[in-house]
Amino acid sequence: MLRFLRDGAPPEDALLPGPVLGRGRWLGLVPAGTEAILLAAPESGFRIEEAALLSTLRVLALAARRRPRSLPVALYVLARGDARRFRNTLRLAAAVSPLGAWETWRDGRARPVEPAFDRAPETTVRVGLRMDAAADQVEAVRRSLTALAGQTHRDWRLVLRWTGGAPPAVADDARVREVSGAAPAFPDADAVGFLAPGDEPAPDALAQLAACFAGPDPAALAYGDEEARRDGRRQPRLKPGWSPDLALVGGPAYPGRPLLLGAGFAAGLPWRPEEGARALTLAAAAAAPDRVRHVARLLCRSAGGSEAPDAPDSIATALTRAGSPATVRVADGVSDLLWPLPDPPPLVSVVIPTRDRPDLIGTAVLGVLERTAYPALELVIVDNGSTDPAVHALYAGLAGDGRVRRLDRPVPFNFSALVNDGVAASTGSVVVLLNNDVEVLEPDWLAEMVRLAVRPGIGAVGAKLLYGNGRLQHAGVVVGLGGRAGHILRNRPAGTPGHLGRLRVAHEVAGVTAACLAVTRERYDAVGGFDAASFPIDFNDIDFCLRLAATGHRSLWTPRAVLAHHESVSRGPSVGPQRVRFEAEAGCFAARWRATIRDDPYYHPAFSVTAFGEDLE
């Protein structure tokens, strides 16, 4: 992270990209009035190889060459005096690359391993690997053996099992044992894993992964990033931090390879060697280990292979063996987990803060009461001083509905306080926060969220929200996006699959928006609800999710609950004094959660925090 100290103005921070290929590059404008630049970086394994101060004209020229259409936008926002947006527009054009430009981006950042500089912590961890290969894969096997011979971590063993008849011996390394027919699952080792014929681990791959199994708190599972061949090109698999739900239904790309498991952990899994590598991964994910490490470095050029999703029966077998209550459902060719709804379903309290705007609150109320297929709900409307007669007429029409309760709070607008008051007045064991500008689109949205919210270890659950034009508005919050926090892939087509297909299934995220958020009352109360003092209007929802995470409760986003969100139409944009207030809350958020801003566990450090998509920094 860089920090710009400015004369007479608050400092500004900028996140640096992770050196996932050994080297990272950052380009941005120095804010006016900067007197000094501070750098926060690791004490070892880091150095600045080049630094240059470029003129604004040079950066404009670079932006015009790379993305000509961005230049008029940059000049327009500069003329309006929006310095922050001007800088971000230039960075988007000059320093951010689409994921489709991976090979060019990679070639500009790859750096050979320097043993004296890149040395991973030396360990006594022995690595045991297994490779199953057919006789016609000899050349692929040799590529893998060459890569293993070049590992900086030397203490490894490999069982090379030939299927369908063994060719002449191909290995001249005593650490490789070639067999045909029955074979031990893995060599005797501290950490074990599979390689596929043709996998080429980076020289420091085993060193980086083995280090995860050393020390007083060894990992149960560790994995890194990879580059796989697909359609004749190399494409990256830049993986999030440990996401057990995604590991079960995300297919072979996650956690993929390279992957090692603690030998003791692997030995206790309900799995047989003949079932193969993916079955072992599913068994590990279903066991939900809590000691998992993700090495955010490109550690393997994998052989690729089938991109087909796992057979539902394979996932179901892993769930059954682990004793999980979840089952597998398939919709549009995508397998997802179906978690049971308690019987009887718990009472859900839907809390909507609102003021005037009868068109909005009328649509929201109609959606909850008439278009939601959930048998046990109550609606708590927290009115912030409405004066519109149409709103009061709406309230009069609801007076006879025993499911509806209204709180009058004609006080200065404080979203967090309104939410807290509504939750305190409700009686359900599950609370759903809903904005007054949200429209119900599908009747099963609430049941889908409740199924997840009542699971052990789950904090907040968020929905798939769409703009009025049908494009994505909310698919989870990334901490650090835009400098503080933002919605990933907003304004993309509704069916956007996301990197590794994550947006097709429910998965872990750093946080979700309070525009539609479900949580059990017990967990809401355990963290004290929303922080009305520090975050009266903005950042309150992501702060709430991060406080839940600090108690061991992770947030989930699900594509199975789909609603429309006509974002902030009831309040409008923040300008003037509202903008000053927004910046004050943003500063408070940055101070409280700077460590997470620097490293959202579910957003890969190669991805840009300037763009709101999965682009490369």
Image (tube, rainbow, N blue to C red):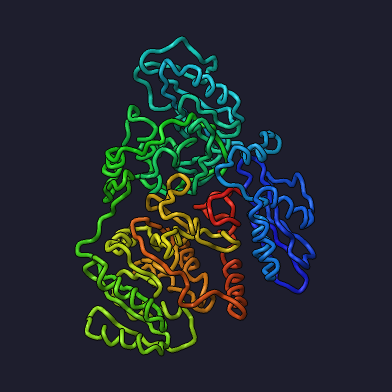
Drawn side of residue 38 relative to residue 529, left or right: right
Residue 19 position by quadrant: top right
Instruction: State which quadrant residue 133 falls in.
Output: top left
Q: Nearer the viewer, residue 465 or 126?
A: 465
Task: Please name the residue shown 45% across and 27% down the image.
Answer: 196
Q: Is residue 604 visible?
A: yes
Q: Position of residue 489 (x, y in %)?
A: 49, 55
Percent across and percent down for residue 1 are 66, 56
Mark yes or no: residue 124 visible.
no
Residue 301, picture quadrant: top right
- In the rendered image, the vertical position of residue 140 relative to residue 215, given as above or below: above
- Along the line of sight, which residue is nearer the eye, 500 or 423? 500
User: Could you tell me which residue is drawn at 45 percent across and 56 percent down?
Assistant: 509
The vertical placement of 259 against 612, above or below, is: above
Residue under the point 47% across and 72% down: 568
Q: Position of residue 239 (x, y in %)?
A: 50, 45
In this rendered view, identify the residue nearer to me: 539 or 271.
539
From the top left corner, tell me how far across and down residue 176 is, in percent.
49, 20
Residue 137 drawn above or below residue 523 = above
Lateral position of residue 369 relative to residue 8, left or right: left
Number of numbered discs overlaid on the protein picture:
0
Question: Residue lying farthest left?
Answer: 344
194 relative to 393 in the view: left or right: right
21, 204: nearer the viewer = 21
